[in-house]
């Protein structure tokens, strides 16, 4: 039984065309860009920008954003070629199945669970924090934190109920239908982009040029007293000052870009996938990069970045407005409300992406059939959505957000690297297949994608990298015990 058996693209496309009983084709180029932005702008921008600036890159967090964007651009160009060539639900997983064979496809599918399912869990935890912030902290600590967390005052977490709540609501919305979900998403994207623009426009007037010098954190930056006997020492770690800090910051803010590839998971539901997928992927990436760099420039200009180590650590954007933009308290509340809506759309697209990856894996026999059963009326994979809610809910309710967030980044980087490799392989083994969109300068761009994304993995926290590797080993066990014996291709080829 070969580990490298592949799916035929021709058969794959023929199966997808037989869409009478499959997923509905309802998404246009504009809704795909909106879907991308819906998945992209979230906790990464509103939470991790301040963390990356204060702990790693200082004002040069803008450069960190650009580095992360370059890695995503290279990977995005590779995604766009695949998505236009193989417009099938399932994204990187499907691409790998046709190019690198079953085992690599499984590895990517398994890594994508880290990206989408844990990504949704991470943002649901951030949602819970901001909700409590908006409500003035009325939710008891124990009911909005994981059992692994405790407050400075000694309270312990038990379960994160708001995170569970938002996951349930959005799972039910997804079951109702992709078109409805896309419509809700479009409204949220409008609000989210609007608030980012308003913050940039108003905040620009409050930039204090003194805050922007020096631009990088100097090698001899003084330690910062965090109170309670704790001190943050910039000189201790190469990832906390100078250019090392800029790269460390890139690994942190990379989370802010996760999601543009989620557009490719909806390829089968796009009206004109060959033209619209590249527009959806690259368009959403471009819009977000511009917004992020401007946002980071304003945030670090309005408030000194060391503030984000201390009082401004949580709800950093509201903090900056309240403390350094007198007369704009209303904006702080508005920003929080928009952030809550924004987080919801990120979770929605992540859950959508995950259920579509499961759909494809299940159609291929690698995971049980229940993951591709469609609802008789809504034609959505409702059982999969419900199982996913339980799985993601366990993480959202019981795991700290930072753990889930770092794992999400590693899983995504791994998938990006394999997609870049897939383009190089595909150009060799199937050079004549029509490619409505071609990755320019191949193999230079895919190789650069592998290098930049690989560098970001090296700048992630070593413990997180180990945990992610354990997850991948667990996946391999499942593959060898179950999946390869149930694979549709394997069963078809049996004598
Ligand atoms: N990019 C998404 C976010 O920042 C995952 O929340």
Image (tube, rainbow, N blue to C red):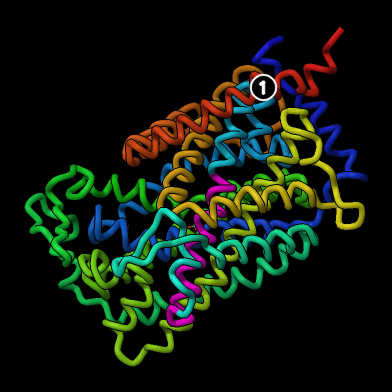
- Vertical placement of residue 115 versus 209, above or below: above
- Vertical placement of residue 302 versus 152, above or below: below
Residue at the disc numbered 1: 102
The span picked out in magenta is 115-137
Q: Is residue 268 left or right of residue 338?
A: right
Residue nearest the viewer, comparing 110 with 403: 403
- Vertical placement of residue 11 versus 326, above or below: above
The image shows residue 493 at horizontal and vertical percentages of 83, 13
The image shows residue 132 at horizontal and vertical percentages of 47, 75
Which residue of the protein is positioned furthest toward the bottom in this rendering?
327
Q: Is residue 45 left or right of residue 215?
A: right
Q: Which residue occupies 55% across, 28% down?
A: 474
Q: Is mark 1 within 8 Å of ligand 1?
A: no
Q: Which residue occupies 87% across, 52% down?
A: 375
| Residue 38: quarter of image | bottom right
Q: How many marks?
A: 1
Q: Is there any visible trace of residue 101 in the rendered image? A: no
Q: Which residue occupies 72% across, 28% down?
A: 366
Whether residue 136 is in magenta: the answer is: yes
Residue nearest the viewer, comparing 24 with 370: 370
Whether residue 415 is in magenta: the answer is: no
Q: Is residue 420 left or right of residue 358?
A: left
* Main SS class of the magenta portion in the image: helix
The image shows residue 237 at horizontal and vertical percentages of 18, 44
The image shows residue 127 at horizontal and vertical percentages of 51, 66
Q: Which residue occupies 64% across, 23% down?
A: 479
Q: Is there any visible trace of residue 20 in the rendered image? A: yes
């Amino acid at each position: 039984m070969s580990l490298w058996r592949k799916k035929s693209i021709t058969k794959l496309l023929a199966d997808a065309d037989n869409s009478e009983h499959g997923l509905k084709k309802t998404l246009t180029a504009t809704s795909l860009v909106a879907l991308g932005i819906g998945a992209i702008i979230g906790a990464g921008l509103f939470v991790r920008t301040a963390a990356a600036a204060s702990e790693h890159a200082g004002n040069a967090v803008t450069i960190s954003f650009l580095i992360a964007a370059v890695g995503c651009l290279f990977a995005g160009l590779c995604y766009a070629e695949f998505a236009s060539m193989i417009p099938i639900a399932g994204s990187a997983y499907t691409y790998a199945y046709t190019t690198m064979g079953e085992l690599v496809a499984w590895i990517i599918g398994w890594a994508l669970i880290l990206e989408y399912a844990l990504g949704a869990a991470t943002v649901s935890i951030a949602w819970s924090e901001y909700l409590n912030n908006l409500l003035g902290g009325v939710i008891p600590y124990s009911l909005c934190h994981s059992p692994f967390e405790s407050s400075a005052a000694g309270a312990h977490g038990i379960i994160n109920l708001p995170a569970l709540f938002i996951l349930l609501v959005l799972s039910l919305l997804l079951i109702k239908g992709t078109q409805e979900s896309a419509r809700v998403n479009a409204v949220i994207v409008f609000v989210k982009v609007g608030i980012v623009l308003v913050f940039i426009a108003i905040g620009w007037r409050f930039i204090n040029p003194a805050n922007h010098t020096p631009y990088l954190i100097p090698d001899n930056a003084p330690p910062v007293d965090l109170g309670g006997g704790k001190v943050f020492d910039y000189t201790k770690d190469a990832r906390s000052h100078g250019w090392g800090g800029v790269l460390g910051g890139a690994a942190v803010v990379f989370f802010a870009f996760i999601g543009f590839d989620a557009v490719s998971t909806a390829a089968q539901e796009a009206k004109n996938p060959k033209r619209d997928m590249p527009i959806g992927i690259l368009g959403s990436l471009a819009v977000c990069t511009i917004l992020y760099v401007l946002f980071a420039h304003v945030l670090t200009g309005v408030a000194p970045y060391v503030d984000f180590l201390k009082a401004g650590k949580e709800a950093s954007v509201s903090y900056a407005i309240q403390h350094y933009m007198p007369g704009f308290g209303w904006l702080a509340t508005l920003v929080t409300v928009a952030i809550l809506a924004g987080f919801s759309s990120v979770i929605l697209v992540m859950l959508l992406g995950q259920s579509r990856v499961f759909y494809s894996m299940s159609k291929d026999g690698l995971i049980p059939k229940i993951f591709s059963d469609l609802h008789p009326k809504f034609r959505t994979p409702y059982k999969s959505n419900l199982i996913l809610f339980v799985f993601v809910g366990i993480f959202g309710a019981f795991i700290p957000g930072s753990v889930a967030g770092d794992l999400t980044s590693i899983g995504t980087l791994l998938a990006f690297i394999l997609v870049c490799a897939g383009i190089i392989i595909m150009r060799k083994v199937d050079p004549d297949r029509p490619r409505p969109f071609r990755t320019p300068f191949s193999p230079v761009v895919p190789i650069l994608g592998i290098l930049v994304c690989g560098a970001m993995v090296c700048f992630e926290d070593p413990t997180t990298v180990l945990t992610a590797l354990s997850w991948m080993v667990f996946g391999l066990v499942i593959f060898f015990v179950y999946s390869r014996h149930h694979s549709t291709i394997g069963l078809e080829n049996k004598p």
